[in-house]
Image (spheres, rainbow, N blue to C red):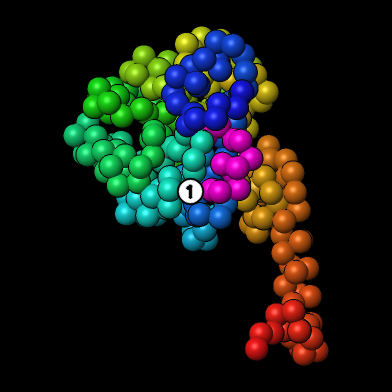
Amino acid sequence: MQQPTRRVTILDLADAKQERRPITMVTAYDWSTARLVDGAGIDCVLVGDSVAMVVAGRSSTIPATLDQMVYHGEIVSRACQRALVVVDLPFPYQHLGVRPAVEACARLLKETGCQAVKLEGTAGQADVIAGIASAGIPVIGHVGLRPQAVHQLGGYRMQRDIDQLLTDARAAADAGAVAVVLECIPREAARTITAALDVPTIGIGAGPDCDGQVLVFHDLVGLSTDRVPKFVRAYADTKVTIAAGLARWKEDVVARTFPGPAETRG
Ligand code: KIV
């Protein structure tokens, strides 16, 4: 997508689809990484509920709480000057009915300063998306592999039912979603859905034909210590760089060469 100097808005995402300019989205959960992602000109910063896995080391995103999303969302929103900040609605608010979901999303919007929320769901959550949208809260749908439903889906596996995927994505868009994340679905399904929807699709493990792409920051920069999905390409080797820096610092401390004259005052 082009680089507006002002804040990216949902209208820019709609324009990007019309003008076939790819949209970029990367996760961030803290001040330093949010500054880096925003500074790199990434269009959207996602405070994903993946925070539960990436930051807290949990085995799924299910334990992420609303308070935790508010905490991380507020930090990231404050750090970002240009990117559209999106905060995930944690499990299970979208399944509790329209009112609790709107209340939770309103809290995310009011207390974090984000510009949009994202929620996982099927066509069954269309009424909830409609309620959130009619409250004036920009909402992004998330279909395909829905990590919050990992136990129901039998694991982190590709979702292949094209008719169901199209139904779910259409339902989200028709209900008022401003974009739809497509996670871990076949390329053909993503291409069909992208052509069928007026709103942008943002893919992760969904092939190159989506209107945009999203990746988890730690996967993208080679910082993830656990399982990395096959669809990830690491664009840096940060883990190795950090480990080398730590080892050198430890050596210097043991050799009493740190702190040296440059770091010693007085
Ligand atoms: O929580 C998250 O990081 C996500 C992305 C994988 C899209 O939802």
Residue 171 seen from this side: no
Camera-side residue: 120 or 51?
51
Residue 174 is situated, as x and y percent measured from the top left of the image, at 36, 14
Camera-side residue: 159 or 146?
146
Residue 26 magenta: no
Camera-side residue: 204 or 179?
179
Depicted 43 relative to depicted 22: above or below = below
Depicted 97 relative to depicted 200: above or below = below
> Which residue is located at x 42 percent, y 28 percent?
140
Q: How many marks?
A: 1
Mark 1 and ligand 1: say if the CB distance to the nearest ligand atom is below 8 Å.
no
Which quadrant does the N terminus fall into? top right
155 sits left or right of 187 in the view: left
Depicted 113 relative to depicted 175: above or below = below
Which quadrant does the C terminus fall into? bottom right
Residue 108 is situated, as x and y percent measured from the top left of the image, at 32, 43
Camera-side residue: 138 or 260?
260
Residue 250 is situated, as x and y percent measured from the top left of the image, at 74, 81
Residue 41 magenta: yes
Q: What amino acid does circle 1 point to?
A: Ala
Q: Quadrant of residue 158?
A: top right
Q: Which residue of the protein is positioned furthest toward the front in this rendering?
A: 266
Residue 113 seen from this side: yes
Residue 58 is situated, as x and y percent measured from the top left of the image, at 49, 58
> Which residue is located at x 38 percent, y 50 percent?
74
Element type where label 1 sits in the image: helix
Q: Which residue of the protein is positioned furthest toward the left in this rendering?
A: 99
Q: Quadrant of residue 115?
A: top left
> Which residue is located at x 46 percent, y 54 percent?
52
Q: Which residues are magenta?
A: 34-44
Kindly identify which residue carries mark 1.
79
166 sits left or right of 226 in the view: left
